[in-house]
Amino acid sequence: MSPVSDEALLAGFASGDPEAAVEFVRRFQARVYGLARTIVRDRAMAEDVAQETFVRAWRRAASYDARRGRVLAWLLAIARNRAIDVTRLRSIEPLDPEVVAARLELERQSSGDVDESSRVDERKTLRDALADLPAEQRRALVLAVYFGRTAAEISELDGIALGTVKWRIRQALSKLREEVEGRYVD
Amino acid sequence: MSTRRSCEEVRALAPEVALGIADGKERAEVLAHVASCAACRSHLAELADVADDLLALTPSEEPPAGFETRVLAELGIEPSRRSRRLRRPLVRPRRVLVAAAVASLMAVTATASALVLTSQDERELAGHYQAALERVGGEYFQAARLHDAQDRPVGQVFGYQGRPSWLFIVVYAPYRQTPLTATLTTTERDVIPLQAVDLDEQRASWGGEIPVDLREVELVRVVDENGNAYEARVPAGPGE
């Protein structure tokens, strides 16, 4: 029997089905908690973030755009925004972007992905492309993606011109997009 | 007033919008442009997909034992009862829980010793909080996050239940604009406009008396001139 799709599970979760809710939390809790740990680091804070993520997901399930069909991405975006909120409220400094990148590498080596294979392949492509970026571009991108730092904040943090930061972010994201898109064009 | 951006300008701004780090004005301009430009809309969507996928690269990690049970309890779910419907969440974020605990303590001072506050710090916080409210005859304080439609943090809302009740709205830098229009929605679904809330680089917050009790306020909504709406859902006060 094929497993219930993420979308169907979310629909059950949103409609108030207890079994769907249990399965929904089980399916995504490690992904959500893992992201929260990467951003806030502290275990107790990460657990709070993960817990709030599921509560918010339940409250906002109606706003999920089924046309995009990416429940995990939607859930992780909620977790990321909540985690960033916590880091700002508690003045938690971002983890060194190269350490974050190294954590992503660890995931590549011991991948516990249970997603469909095409998605796993896409993530591998993305990881490789991120690893291949010039260090300064990777740093700016990691600070923006995982820690929500604006270009102006990165400029101040690293003591470099705002225009340079914007250019690095633009270049980095464009290259990743080309790599991911190219994989399907080739 | 929004400036109409060219495709070239929008392509330059799109990465920051896709990553959720653009300021409110630029974000609004890009979104206004892509609403009528299919090519730029597609470009932005592709970048947003990459940004989403980057989040999914972080390592999975199992949360501490009991996590699933705690989440379900917070949602009011009893897994063993298959037919039971979900109730509204009973528990609010931990920081607010502490506030709610001390507020409850204040409201039932006669039975305060029956409440268990787990640490000396919490007891001291409760005492401090209670004394502050008693000095001015207030009932409780409340706090809520202000967020946008994608749940990005936009600011904070603080409230005070007393005579009179008041609200204090803080908006983070990228989202401060003039004018911002703020409204309250009450538990009776009445929408009450507040006076103009004009924020900019020099002015990050607005505070003032509200014409209803804080306990009647369910939602605080802030809208900028481009139609971007931000909301804070105000938790119920103690005993409600």
Image (spheres, grey):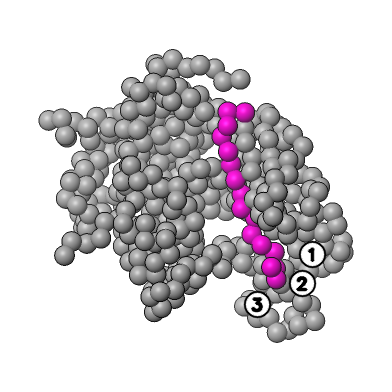
Element under disc 2 = helix
Chain letter belonging to callout 1? B
The CA span between labels 1 and 3 is 19 Å
Q: Are marks 2 and 3 on the same chain?
A: yes
Task: Tell me which amino acid carries mark 3.
Answer: Leu
- Identify whether B81 is placed above or below A173: below
Q: Which residue is mark 1?
A: B139
From the top left corner, tell me how far across and down residue B13 is, in percent. Answer: 43, 25
Above or below: residue B65 compared with residue A172: below
Residue at 48% across / 24% down in the picture? B32
> Which residues are drawn in magenta?
B225-240
In the rendering, at what x and y percent does residue A171 appear? 33, 27
Name the disc covering residue B117, or none. 3
Q: In the picture provided, is B76 more to the left or to the right than B99?
A: left
Both marks 1 and 3 on one chain: yes
Q: Is B238 on the left-hand or right-hand side of A18?
A: right
Q: Position of residue A133 (x, y in %)?
A: 28, 34
Residue B230 counted in the magenta span:
yes
Label 3: how many residues lie within 10 Å, few (<14), some (14-19) or many (20+)?
Answer: some
The secondary structure type at the circle numbered 1 is: loop
- B158 within the magenta span: no
Mark 1 / mark 2, whichever is N-terminal? 2
